[in-house]
Image: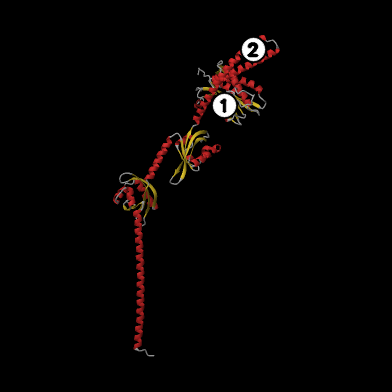
């Protein structure tokens, strides 16, 4: 087959057309691709521009102060309105001056933290505004990548620091009061404890914060009062009253307590402000004063009655001898004898009552108390049942006293008989002597006592004890815990009158179910040769 020139021309023209078509297609594809790339880049540029505008808007309008500065020179490159306003500056140049006044120690610490960790968070700095006013700032910063620049966020905490300082000043004032001031949360956990509370209770602030006030100050025996107060404070937002509480050393005190609810508005949490005053001594003195007035009134009343009875009974007793001369029959003599015995019994009762009221002067001679007790115990041992044992703890070095032997025998015998009767099931009766010097606590409880040495006679039983409610009444005339007909209740009142006439006093301690101890304090004779 022979290929003509026309065929060759057609092939060349067709190939060229195909190549041209491919070239046009390629150009079209490349142009389209370039257009898409350009559009994408333009979109990204638009997005970046919008982000920059958004960031700039956040930067300029942020409520927190923001600035960009050099870590080496502390030169401020950019700042927002908030930080300039915070420092009281109108331009960045003025802000630069304020930043330059930051203390060297603060700047060094910030530089070291940024260089080591790349950031610093909430660092408190005390500085000043442009006008010299006090300024506290909370400084946080982070290093930017690729350079020695840092971006800082600054918050004004001046008001918070001033409030904290005010709280500290108020706390210092609260520490000056002698009252115990404390704050507990709604669950009774201690959150504030002033110096007055430390002094009153013996617990240091560090020991008490975070602990439950009911557990620390009340214990199991007094928790009912604590729970009642908490119930009232939850219902009425306040409570006032008296509570028995315990110190760190275990001593119980009586406090006048005022509770009030304080609501913390920022969080809504409820706190209870408690102010306690120690009234233990006040109550003791009041009780002592009332008791003294009561005893004095009883003494005046019984003394007056005793004088009247004495005036009535004395003529009767004196008339018996006259009547005896005129009566000869046996029945008349028996009546006279009964009248005489009754009159003498009445006069003896009058004598005892007068002894309670003002004591009996009697004779005053130098006596060795141990010798007086030997005689008393010799009399007593014949009347003791087999299940009661006497234990003597007599101090041979105890000094002498000035007194009436018969009267002191009556006092000691009365106490020993009472101790015996308090142990119907048996026990130990302990009699002891010692010499002590009066201390401040003793003189506080017994203000009529004179300072100096005392010979103390103690009589202790292991019997049933005296109820707390009866302790204040046991020295009253005619008060007795015995059954009717077993005693008139004059023994202890007479004993107290005798001891009082010897310039002494009597104390008593008793625990129900464990026993009672009476202690008789008599002034010791001081050797003039010493």
Secondary structure of the residue carrying tag 1 is loop
Is residue 396 visible in this depiction of the protein?
Answer: no
- Rendered residue at 35%/61% (across/down): 48
* Residue name at image x 47 percent, y 43 percent: 270
- The residue at 36%/68% (across/down) is 37
Alpha-carbon neighbours of circle 2 within 10 Å: few (<14), some, or many (≥20)? some
Label 2 and label 1: CA atoms lie apart by 38 Å
Element assignment for label 2: helix
Q: Quadrant of residue 495?
A: top right
Q: Which residue is mark 2?
A: 320
Could you tell whether 414 is left or right of 40 in the image? right
Quarter holding the N terminus?
Answer: bottom left
* Observer-nearest of 92 and 144: 92
The answer to whether residue 123 of the structure is visible from this angle is yes
Question: Count the marks: how many?
Answer: 2
The quarter holding residue 457 reads top right
Q: Position of residue 161 (x, y in %)?
A: 38, 44
Residue at label 1? 473
Q: Upstream in the sequence, badge 2 or badge 1?
A: 2
Eyeballing the image, is 21 above or below 111?
A: below
Residue 338, given in percent of the width and then of the height, sits at 66, 16
Q: Answer above or below: position of 140 versus 170.
A: below
Residue 432: x %, y % from top left? 59, 24
Q: Is residue 252 above or below residue 347?
A: below
Q: Quadrant of residue 15?
A: bottom left
CB within 8 Å, label 2 to label 1: no
Answer few, some or many: residues within 10 Å of disc 1's Cα (few below 14, many 20 plus, some between 14 and 19): some
Q: Is residue 418 left or right of residue 238?
A: right
Judged from this view, the residue extending furthest toward the top is: 325
């Amino acid at each position: 087959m022979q290929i003509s020139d026309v065929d060759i021309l057609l092939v060349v023209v067709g190939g060229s057309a195909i190549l041209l078509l491919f070239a046009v297609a390629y150009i079209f594809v490349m142009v389209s691709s370039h257009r898409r790339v350009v559009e994408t880049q333009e979109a990204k540029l638009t997005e970046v521009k919008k982000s920059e505008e958004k960031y700039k808007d956040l930067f300029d309008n942020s409520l927190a102060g923001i600035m960009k500065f050099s870590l080496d020179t502390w030169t401020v490159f950019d700042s927002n309105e908030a930080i300039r306003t915070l420092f009281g500056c109108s331009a960045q140049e003025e802000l630069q001056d304020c930043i330059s006044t930051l203390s060297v120690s603060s700047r060094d610490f910030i530089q070291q933290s940024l260089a080591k960790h790349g950031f610093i968070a909430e660092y408190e700095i005390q500085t000043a505004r442009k006008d010299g006013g006090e300024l506290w700032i909370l400084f946080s910063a982070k290093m930017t990548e690729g350079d020695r620049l840092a971006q800082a966020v600054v918050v004004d905490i001046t008001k918070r620091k001033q409030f904290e300082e005010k709280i500290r000043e108020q706390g210092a004032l609260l520490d000056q009061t002698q009252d115990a001031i404390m704050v507990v949360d709604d669950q009774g956990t201690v959150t504030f404890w002033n110096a007055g509370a430390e002094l009153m209770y013996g617990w240091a602030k560090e020991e008490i914060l975070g602990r439950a006030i009911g557990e620390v100050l009340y214990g199991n025996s007094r928790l009912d009062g604590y729970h009642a107060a908490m119930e009232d404070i939850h219902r009425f937002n306040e409570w006032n009253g008296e509570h028995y509480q315990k110190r760190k050393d275990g001593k119980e005190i009586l406090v006048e307590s005022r509770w009030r609810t304080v609501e913390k508005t920022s969080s809504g949490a409820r706190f209870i402000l408690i102010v306690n005053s120690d009234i233990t001594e006040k109550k003791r003195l009041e009780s002592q004063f009332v008791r003294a007035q009561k005893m004095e009134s009883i003494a005046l009343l019984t003394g007056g009655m005793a004088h009247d009875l004495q005036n009535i009974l004395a003529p009767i007793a004196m008339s018996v001898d006259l009547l005896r001369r005129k009566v000869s029959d046996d029945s008349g003599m028996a009546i006279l004898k009964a009248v005489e015995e009754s009159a003498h019994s009445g006069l003896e009762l009058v004598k005892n009552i007068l002894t309670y009221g003002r004591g009996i002067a009697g004779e005053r001679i130098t006596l060795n108390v141990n010798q007086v007790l030997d005689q008393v115990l010799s009399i007593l041992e014949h009347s003791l049942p087999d299940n009661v044992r006497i234990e003597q703890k007599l101090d041979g070095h105890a000094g002498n006293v000035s007194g009436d032997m018969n009267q002191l025998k009556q006092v000691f015998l009365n106490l020993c008989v009472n101790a015996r009767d308090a142990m119907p099931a048996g026990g130990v009766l302990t009699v002891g002597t010692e010499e002590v010097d009066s201390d401040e606590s003793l003189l506080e409880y017994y203000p009529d006592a004179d300072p100096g040495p005392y010979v103390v006679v103690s009589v202790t039983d292991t019997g049933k004890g005296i109820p707390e409610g009866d302790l204040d009444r046991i020295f009253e005339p005619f008060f007795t815990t015995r059954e009717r007909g077993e005693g008139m209740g004059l023994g202890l009142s007479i004993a107290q009158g005798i001891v009082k006439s010897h310039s002494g006093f009597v104390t008593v301690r008793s625990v129900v179910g464990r026993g009672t101890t009476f202690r008789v304090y008599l002034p010791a004779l001081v050797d003039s040769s010493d």
